[in-house]
Image (spheres, coloured by chain):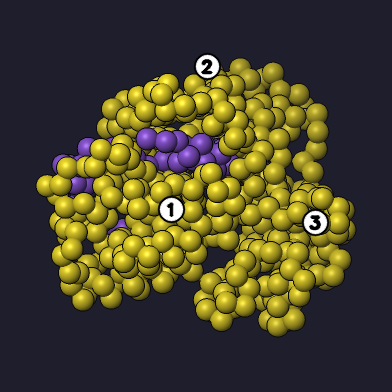
Chain colours: A yellow, B purple
Amino acid sequence: MSGFGEREDGTFLLALSHVLGVPELLRVLEGSGLALGDALARLLHPSLTHGEPLPESVRAEAAAALSKVRMRIPARAGLLARDQARRPDLARLLDPLFAPRAARPPADAPRAVGCPSKHEPPGRLRELLPGYRILQLIRDPRDVLVSRFYHDLAHVSPAMLPLFAGRQRDGTLRQRDDWATAYFAARRDELLAYYADFAHARLGPDVRLVTRYEDLLADAPAGMLRAAAFIGVAPALREPAGGFDLGAHCERFAFERVTAGDAAQIDAATGERRNSFLRSGNAGDWRTYFDRRLAHDLGPGFAALLVLLGYERDGAWIDALPDRAPRAWDFSRLRSRQSLVRSFRHLWEADPAMQERFPNPTDLLAADGGFLGHLVREARPEVMAHRADLIALARLWNADTRETVAF
Amino acid sequence: MSPTAVSTRTVAAPVVHVATTRFVTTAMPKSGSNWFEAMLFGLRG
């Protein structure tokens, strides 16, 4: 069963963990008499019908794959599970996946079952998951770059740091004069790679629906209705007898309440969200930060991408940019503590004892210092070196001092 | 999920006798996918 894929089982688990939370997912599966490995094997191999014993080799390989996936489940898994009303009936959700081939679906079975694949290009999804419909969300790449910059400032890793700063002969860090060129070129290349197959003919309208983030901001219910129609659940939304109010549904999932990335941690004393990189989520924020030089640095490939995605007709927007952007990039939004935890999260992932001791490694407000405190106390050389760099950057960039004290 | 962790195995076609649409979502990071997916996976049906 080679290739019992990291990607596929991760996709499935992420889908369920997004809405349910991993601990609860595992409990429900156990209560249903379904081992997780069995569930995944049957999802990925429909020929293994319900009730058919799994070959031992399949079971062992699935267990190994699951172990890896479980390690990678983000702490955010419980994010949506805090709201009881959002929890789906998992048993119903799984029914159509594990039903025998010839079985008819129960009348109340879900009409669509989906999973987030996150950042996989749609062409690759088409190859890996034939028969699946693809919902692709796109956003103005200029706004993506702005948002990504502030996200990255909250998660500076040792690998990312050289994009922003260089080390002088005495070992101290100094911000690179050309940081914007280095950083945005790296992020631009990721965008170009992801969108390389955007216009491919095999991604026809029967296979993929493109939804613009900007359209969702303007009219979320309309966007959701389009998506629902594409996956065949729109009729259920329109049934007045069901009492489903799409507008209220979208309002309940308002952007501000669900986009906290890792589970938001609110400082009880100040009410401040301490681990958030959340910003406005607005469309067009790039106009605040872009100047002509940045646009030229991003190059013709990036300008062509904007045209491909329908955000610009041509490159005239570049000439209209100011020589100096209205606002400078705000490096004070560096999040040192969060960056350190994220940079060394793999130590937590590789150690079951750590996971038991610190169920949420990104909990920066834990009374005993949590995983962050453990990292610092343990004082591995690579951790302390990055910590020193992050503290130096925080001073250099005048970052929130509350992020650097007691750290 | 890392875009690099990709299996080379071809996934078998889904069960066709079950009248359930299967779908996946995809977006670049920082494109609003958490929000989109929260609304989408919260839909009834």
Report whether A208 appears left or right of A314.
left
Q: Mark 2 points at which residue?
A: A313
Residue farthest along the left direction in this orientation: A102
x then y, percent, for residue A370: 71, 72
Tell me which residue sits at (66%, 26%) in the image.
A284
Q: Which amino acid does label 1 sit on?
A: Leu
The answer to which of marks 1 and 3 sits earlier in the sequence is: 1
State the separation of the CA atoms marked 2 and 1.
40 Å
Q: In this view, does B10 lie above or below A379?
A: above
Q: Quadrant of the C terminus of chain A?
A: bottom right
SS type, badge 1: helix
Q: Position of residue B10 (x, y in %)?
A: 22, 53
Mark 3 nearby-residue class (10 Å; few <14, some 14–19, many ≥20): few
* Mark 2 on the same chain as mark 1: yes
Q: Which mark is residue A267?
A: 3
Instruction: State left or right for residue A258 relative to residue A239.
Output: right
User: Is A53 displayed left or right of B39 in the figure?
Assistant: left
Label drawn at residue A16: 1
- Count of number-bearing discs: 3
Check if mark 1 and mark 3 are on a common chain.
Answer: yes
Q: What element carries label 2?
A: loop
Which of disc 1 and disc 2 is earlier in sequence? 1
Mark 2 vs mark 3, CA separation in Å: 46 Å
Q: Which residue is at 61% across, 17% downward?
A: A316
Q: Which residue is drawn at 48% across and 61% down?
A: A24
Quick check: A170 above or below A186? below
Would residue A303 be visible to someone looking at this image?
Answer: no
Q: Nearer the viewer, residue A171 or A22?
A: A22
Is residue A43 among the parts visible in the rendering? yes
The location of residue A68, given as percent across then percent down, is 42, 69
* Precedes in sequence: disc 2 or disc 3: 3
